[in-house]
């Protein structure tokens, strides 16, 4: 399927995580039965660039496909005109997708932290607690039982990926507290036959930022993937996120953008 690398690897990760991907010609229907609260695990992905501005059609189709959803999430294959979506109170946003075919730089491990691949129930629980705490700080989603259910379901899926050897999730710990974490997933081959690895959820607690944790973990994850055949690394960040500067310093270059509309 001719999709930008951001969406292509997103779909690969979702498929490996147990999501159902239904191709309906000009769009995909993505459903995650085990995690109905996951907005970007239950969404429509428009695959026909000529249809990216048909806002009313796609919103109506989303509601028909996900009648119980409390959100609207629609991925787009190219930059749309904002007006049709704004008329439906759906702002258009984009993520910057970056990639490299050279092994990303690994920064020195900062003092005072222990680095672990998440393997034990206690480590996964600590990563979930970090995710919930960050959401409480930002207020990005309501910090209620539904968000906790979503987080725990996502951690179970990630643990299964790790157990199968298809992914690694890493954390930096102070005692039992996970203060920084990320993941990397092996996504199969791209059109050039290169094995692609996609990063997931790079996160560092506010009090532990600017200490080199993310730069170190990105490099550790890159080497884990390289040892398993990865030849291309893909990472995405919100377009206004300063993390892009860090990724450039580690060897990543802007590749493309992923466009989407969402209402929580």
Image (cartoon, rainbow, N blue to C red):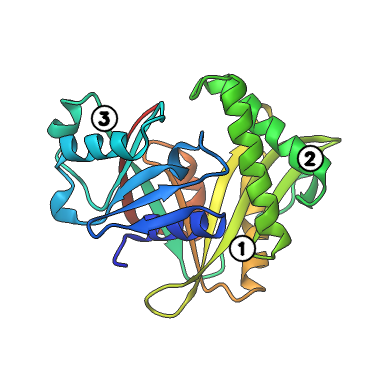
What residue is rendered at 62% in x and 71% in y? 226
Q: Secondary structure at mark 2?
A: strand
Tell whether 120 sits left or right of 170: right
Q: Earlier in the sequence, mark 1 or mark 2?
A: 2
Q: Any mark on residue 173, and which?
A: 2
Tell whether 68 sits left or right of 181: left
Give the quadrant of the N terminus: bottom left
**Mark 1 vs mark 2, CA separation in Å:** 19 Å
Q: Nearer the viewer, residue 204 or 168?
A: 168
Q: Are marks 1 and 2 in contact (CB under 8 Å)?
A: no
The picture places residue 164, in percent across and down from the top left corner, at 69, 64
The picture places residue 150, in percent across and down from the top left corner, at 58, 34
The picture places residue 19, in percent across and down from the top left corner, at 50, 52
**Mark 3 vs mark 2, CA separation in Å:** 37 Å
**Mark 1 vs mark 3, CA separation in Å:** 34 Å
Q: Any mark on residue 91, and which?
A: 3
């Amino acid at each position: 399927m001719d999709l930008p690398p951001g969406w292509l690897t997103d779909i690969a990760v979702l498929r490996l995580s147990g999501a159902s991907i239904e191709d309906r010609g000009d769009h995909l229907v993505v459903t995650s039965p085990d995690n109905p609260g996951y907005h970007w695990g239950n969404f429509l992905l428009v695959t026909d660039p000529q249809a990216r501005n048909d806002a009313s059609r796609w919103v109506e189709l989303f509601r028909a496909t996900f009648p119980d959803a409390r959100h609207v999430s629609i991925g787009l294959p190219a930059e749309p005109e904002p007006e049709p979506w704004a008329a439906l109170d759906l702002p258009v946003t984009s993520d910057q997708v970056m990639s490299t075919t050279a092994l990303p730089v690994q920064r020195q491990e900062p003092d005072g932290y222990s680095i672990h691949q998440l393997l034990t129930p206690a480590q996964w629980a600590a990563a979930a607690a970090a995710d919930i705490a960050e959401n409480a700080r930002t207020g990005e989603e309501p910090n209620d039982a539904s968000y906790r259910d979503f987080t725990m379901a996502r951690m179970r899926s990630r643990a299964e990926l790790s157990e199968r050897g298809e992914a690694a999730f890493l954390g930096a710990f102070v005692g039992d507290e996970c203060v920084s974490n990320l993941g990397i997933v092996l996504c199969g081959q791209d059109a050039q036959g290169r094995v692609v690895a996609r990063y997931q959820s790079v996160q560092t607690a506010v009090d532990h930022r600017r200490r080199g944790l993310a730069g170190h973990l990105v490099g550790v994850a890159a080497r884990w993937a390289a040892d398993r055949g990865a030849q291309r690394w893909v990472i995405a960040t919100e377009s206004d996120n300063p993390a892009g500067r860090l990724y450039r310093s580690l060897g990543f270059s802007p590749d493309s953008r992923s466009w989407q509309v969402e209402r929580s």
